[in-house]
Image (cartoon, rainbow, N blue to C red):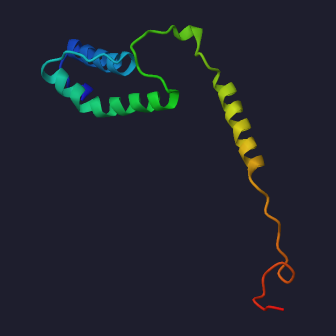
Amino acid sequence: MFNELENDKDKLSFIKAVLDKQFLGEEPELKGMVKFAYVSQLHSIEKQIKGWQDATGQELTGAYTDPLQGCLVDPLQQLKEEEKEEEKEEEKEEVKPILHWNRDLPTGIKD
């Protein structure tokens, strides 16, 4: 759709609308072909936003964060914690004894 827009002003409006929606959660006010192009991409944008919100547990608020400051949670630390939790779960699983075919299985014969 981007390439179908006729002039640079419309292309800039389209890109700005997409980025404002995706990163700031702002709804644009568009007209004409720019609005048509934007609406055609809206489902995809909303799915990306939902994926980000589900992955981070944060709502898209439109608050700007300086990208040079980094994130609040170290991703590697988060992975290490998840691995530790998985190891604990594996340790909790009961180890079932191996049954001997002749000694441990019921035979159905009563003494």
At horizontal 26% and vertical 18% (from top left) the residue drawn is 27
Residue 12 picture location, percent across and down: 27, 14
Figure check: 65 above or below 11: above
Quadrant occupied by the N terminus:
top left
Q: Which quadrant would residue 35 be assigned to in this image?
A: top left
Q: Which residue is outermost to the right?
A: 103
Figure check: 42 above or below 94: above
At horizontal 67% and vertical 35% (from top left) the residue drawn is 82
Residue 9 picture location, percent across and down: 22, 11
Residue 38 picture location, percent across and down: 24, 25
Residue 31 versus residue 23: which sits nearer the camera?
Answer: 23
Q: Which residue is outermost to the left?
A: 32
Q: Which quadrant would residue 28 be assigned to in this image?
A: top left
Quadrant occupied by the C terminus:
bottom right
Q: Which quadrant would residue 10 be assigned to in this image?
A: top left
37 left or right, relative to 101:
left
Residue 2 picture location, percent across and down: 26, 25
74 left or right, relative to 53:
right
76 left or right, relative to 42:
right
At horizontal 51% and vertical 7% (from top left) the residue drawn is 66
Residue 49 versus residue 9: which sits nearer the camera?
Answer: 49
At horizontal 65% and vertical 28% (from top left) the residue drawn is 78
